[in-house]
Image (cartoon, rainbow, N blue to C red):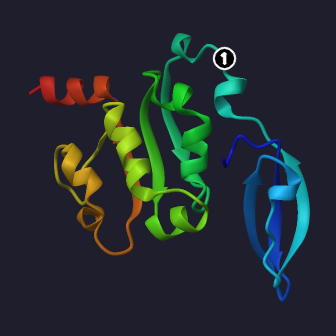
């Protein structure tokens, strides 16, 4: 299981040093390094839910997640903090191909937010929020996907109830 990790490895393409991909594994023997990659460094990690033990006592206005496809891993390790009601808005990159490459499922990623009551704020000058079924339909996001803003149930209610 990803991000129950005790460490992460930063991998580089052998012929292109600045590529930098991170893989998190539970134990070092689980690490599968492609033949054209080299191990650059090992970094010890902890889950967000293990670091912030009392997130319900916090009010976090916004969180920005931009970790090149590892957003699903961050969500898995921080569900209590990120989706427990303390965070009003989460701005994240949403690239299904990258999520899949890093071991996550884009639909499960969306479903986790939707099941917690978070909704995607419509983009491109449109007012309102996507319904849960629209969030699950990857074609809703169009080509290129990009940045997505999730609003908490309380923020959604504040906007909708304020009409």
- Residue 75 image offset from top left, x and y in percent: 54, 41
Which sits in the foreground, 28 or 93? 28
Residue sticking out furthest to the left: 163
Q: Residue at x 52, y 65 (%)?
A: 100
Judge whether residue 118 can be spotted in this image: no
Q: Position of residue 114 (x, y in %)?
A: 32, 39
Residue sticking out furthest to the front = 29
Task: Give above or below for 39 relative to 86.
Answer: below
Left or right position of 128 against 61:
left
Asked if 129 appears above or below 38 in the picture, the reply is above
Vertical side of 17 occupied by 120: above or below: above
Mark 1 lies on a secondary structure that is loop
Q: In the image, 110: left or right of 84?
A: left
Residue 81 sits in quarter: top right
Q: Which residue is mark 1?
A: 53
Vertical comparison of 127 with 162: above or below: below
From the viewer's perspective, tell me whether residue 3 is left or right of residue 132.
right
**The C terminus - image quarter:** top left
Q: Residue at x 69, y 45 (%)?
A: 3
Q: Farthest residue in the bottom direction?
A: 15
- Residue drawn at the location 87% of the way across and 57% of the way down: 29
- Whether residue 115 sits left or right of residue 60 in the image: it is left
Q: Judge whether residue 103 can be spotted in this image.
A: yes
Q: Where is residue 38 drawn, in percent x and y?
A: 88, 75
Q: Residues within 10 Å of mark 1 (few under 14, many from 20)?
A: few
Tally of marks: 1
């Amino acid at each position: 299981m990803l991000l129950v990790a005790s460490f992460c490895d930063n991998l580089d393409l052998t012929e292109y040093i600045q590529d930098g991909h991170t893989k998190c594994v539970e134990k070092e023997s689980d690490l599968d390094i492609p033949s054209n990659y080299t191990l650059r460094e090992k970094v010890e990690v902890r889950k967000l839910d293990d670091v912030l033990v009392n997130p319900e006592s916090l009010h976090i206005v916004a969180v920005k997640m931009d970790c090149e496809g590892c957003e699903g891993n961050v969500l898995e390790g921080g569900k209590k903090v990120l989706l427990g009601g303390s965070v009003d808005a989460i701005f994240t990159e949403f690239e299904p191909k990258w999520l899949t490459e890093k071991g996550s499922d884009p639909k499960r990623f969306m479903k986790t937010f939707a099941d917690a009551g978070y909704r995607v704020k419509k983009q491109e000058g449109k007012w309102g929020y996507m319904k849960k079924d629209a969030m699950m339909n990857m074609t809703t996001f169009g080509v290129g996907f990009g940045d997505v803003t999730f609003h908490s149930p309380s923020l959604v209610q504040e906007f909708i109830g304020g009409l």
